[in-house]
Image (cartoon, grey):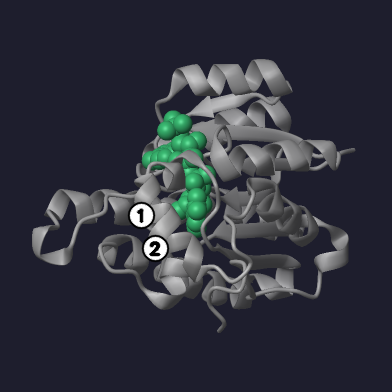
Amino acid sequence: MSRVALVTGGTRGIGAAISTALKAAGYKVAATYAGNDEAAKAFEAETGIPVFKWDVSSYDASKEGIATVEAELGPIEILVNNAGITRDAMFHKMTPQQWNEVIGTNLTGLFNVTHPIWTGMRDRSFGRIINISSINGQKGQMGQANYSAAKAGDLGFTKALAQEGAAKNITVNAICPGYIGTEMVRAIPEKVLNERIIPQIPVGRLGEPEEIARIVVFLASDDAGFITGSTISANGGQFFV
Ligand code: NDP
């Protein structure tokens, strides 16, 4: 029987590519989203992947949403924590709301979604958790103190949980994408992209969502069973750790 995979923020951008690639690899996929019904319904109609709406920054909503997914599809064995937002501002102008929203979705969201699934993975002695962090969590980025802090936190979470999950055959890994051509990045003014960002990427282009999705498919597979607590950077040579 095919394994069930949950992809948070799986209806747009990198998440949509991940959901689609996991489905093509034979998984039963559920994709979540926060509020963009139009994009989610179009994604569901196009791919046949069922979509589920809840805000990952709420523990109760996440718990309830996961119960619904598991009732419909079965126990979740692959979890991709991908949902993320930006609320960029230079720190002297950053509001508590901008800080809290980003930490709530990009860091606390990982707790909220992983925690209700964790016990089941432990009981079944199998799990694959893949957290989508960011190059900006590795190197820091001006104008993104909130985002950089949350994404760096995701890496600490990954390494701690990898140690807890190891004896139960649960692997926990992170991927740090560089600049990928999704709406999040396309929202950056074209002049900034062309004159400041792309020249910093040695391969001379943005990454494609599918290039991240293929890493997820590998980390979810049985072949990746000895990889845990790792961070895979995919950034066109922009930053080495
Ligand atoms: P998009 O903005 O294209 O899509 C984000 C997805 O996350 C949407 O499905 C959105 O739902 C969902 N989402 C956002 N907030 C919440 C929430 N509170 N609860 C549930 N779902 C939510 O993002 P990207 O594809 O660009 O980014 C995906 C991940 O990759 C993020 O974690 C991001 O930080 C990370 N990343 C992206 C990079 C890039 O270059 N694009 C680079 C490095 C990391 P809805 O459609 O309803 O809004």
Helix, strand or loop at label 2? It is: helix
Where is residue 217? Give x, y as percent.
77, 53
Where is residue 47? Give x, y as percent.
72, 23
* Kind of residue sitting beneath label 1: Val
Image position of 195 with respect to 185: above or below:
below
Q: Which residue is mark 1?
A: 192
* Kind of residue sitting beneath label 2: Arg
Where is residue 141? Give x, y as percent.
34, 69
Tags 2 and 1 touching, CB below 8 Å: yes
Image position of 144 with respect to 226: above or below:
above
Q: Residue at x 80, y 39 (%)?
A: 27
Image position of 54 with respect to 111: above or below:
above
Where is residue 132? Give x, y as percent.
55, 57
Q: Residue at x 29, y 62 (%)?
A: 144
Left or right of 225 on screen, residue 18: left
Left or right of 205 on screen, residue 137: left
Image position of 94 with respect to 165: above or below:
above
Mark 1 surroundings within 10 Å by alpha-carbon count, few (fewer than 14), some (14 through 19), many (20 or more): few
Query: Foreground residue, 226 or 38?
Result: 38
Q: Which residue is mark 2?
A: 196
